Image: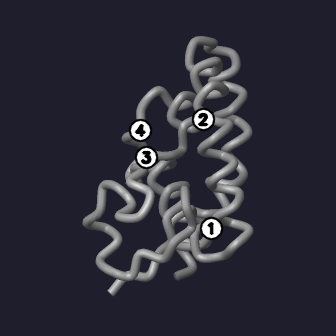
């Protein structure tokens, strides 16, 4: 059984979290996220975004401050992502800024 928390309402979803598209409590989507990174990479289907999502789901969503950060991010990032996705220079800057956290996550994954 998977023990995760909804990034929107913070309630624990004890049943098989991976099978839900929406939180059974607040009905907000669980399969979204990484709005800014998606805008920067131009697609949600990159290994880098998979790493960021896995970190969000495995670590951030398991602690209170992480869930609060996720809620704030989901509230604030969509307009930022829309702004970034239309500007090539900003997309490149964001991808560059993401190199460090993505590299850290890759190295941690290799260490497991």
The residue at which mark 1 appears reads as 60
Crowding near pointer 2: few (<14 within 10 Å), some, many (20+)?
Answer: many
Q: Nearer the viewer, residue 79 or 98?
A: 79
Is 74 rendered above or below residue 103? above
The answer to whether the residues at label 2 and label 4 have Cβ atoms under 8 Å apart is: no
Q: Nearer the viewer, residue 45 or 3?
A: 3
Name which residue lies at 38% across and 52% down.
31
Residue 3 horizontal side relative to residue 55, left or right: left
Q: Quadrant of the rendered structure where residue 99 is?
A: top right
Q: Secondary structure at mark 3?
A: loop
Q: Position of residue 94 (x, y in %)?
A: 68, 32
Whichever of callouts 1 and 2 sits on the residue coming sooner in the sequence is: 2
Gap in angstroms between the C-alphas marked 1 and 3? 15 Å
Q: How many marks?
A: 4
Whichever of callouts 1 and 4 sits on the residue coming sooner in the sequence is: 4
Q: Quadrant of the rendered structure where residue 39 is?
A: top right
Residue 70 horizontal side relative to residue 48, left or right: right
The residue at which mark 2 appears reads as 36
The residue at which mark 4 appears reads as 44
Crowding near pointer 4: few (<14 within 10 Å), some, many (20+)?
Answer: some
Crowding near pointer 1: few (<14 within 10 Å), some, many (20+)?
Answer: many
Q: Please state, as top left, top right, bottom left or bottom right, where the N terminus lies in the image.
A: bottom left
């Amino acid at each position: 059984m998977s023990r995760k928390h909804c990034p929107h309402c913070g309630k624990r979803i004890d049943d098989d979290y991976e099978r839900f598209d929406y939180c059974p409590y607040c009905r907000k989507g669980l399969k979204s996220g990484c709005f800014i990174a998606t805008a920067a990479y131009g697609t949600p289907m990159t290994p880098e975004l998979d790493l960021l999502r896995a970190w969000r789901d495995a670590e951030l969503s398991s602690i209170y401050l992480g869930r609060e950060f996720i809620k704030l991010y989901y509230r604030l990032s969509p307009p930022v992502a829309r702004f970034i996705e239309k500007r090539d220079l900003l997309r490149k800057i964001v991808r560059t800024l993401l190199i460090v956290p993505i590299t850290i996550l890759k190295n941690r994954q290799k260490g497991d």
